[in-house]
Amino acid sequence: MTHLWTSGEPIRVVSDESGVPTAFTWQAQDHPVERIANRWRVDEVWWIARVWRDYFKLTTTTGWLVIMYCDLEANVWYLQRLYD
């Protein structure tokens, strides 16, 4: 089953100097990043609001496959999809 949060679930992220996540915390559980499978940027204006995000599809050492993103305007991270 896949869990999708269209607006994203806020998470705390530790990233390296280039902005690549190395670990994240969600619901008081830490999830170190095992491997980045894909990375892409979205930068577009939709209606009136700008959408400017860095997305990451990654696996964790805790066995999760997730899609997360950083809202680059607000510098806030979100979990968008959890595959289980």
Image: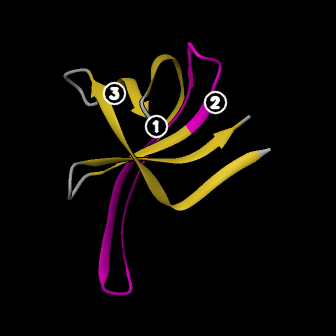
Q: Name which residue type carries label 2.
A: Leu
* Front-lying residue, 15 or 44: 15
Amino acid residing under circle 1? Gln
Residue 20 marker: 3
Q: Which mark is residue 10?
A: none
Q: Residue 35: x percent and y percent?
A: 53, 17
Judge depth for marks 1 and 2 and give the one in front. Answer: 1
Task: Please tell me which of labels 1 and 2 falls first in the chain.
Answer: 1
User: Does 59 sit above or below residue 70?
Assistant: above
Is 58 inside the magenta-drawn segment?
A: yes
Q: Mark 3, residues whose alpha carbon is within 10 Å: few (<14), some, or many (≥20)?
A: some
Mark 1 crowdedness (10 Å alpha carbons): few <14, some 14-19, many ≥20: few
Measured along the vertical axis of the image, is residue 2 above or below residue 43?
above
Callout 3 secondary element? loop
Estimate the x, y position of residue 36 in percent, counting from the top left.
51, 24
Which mark lies nearer to you, 2 or 3?
Answer: 2
Name the residue: 28% across, 25% down.
Answer: 15
Q: Which residue is mark 1?
A: 27
| Image coords of residue 63 (percent x, y) | 65, 19
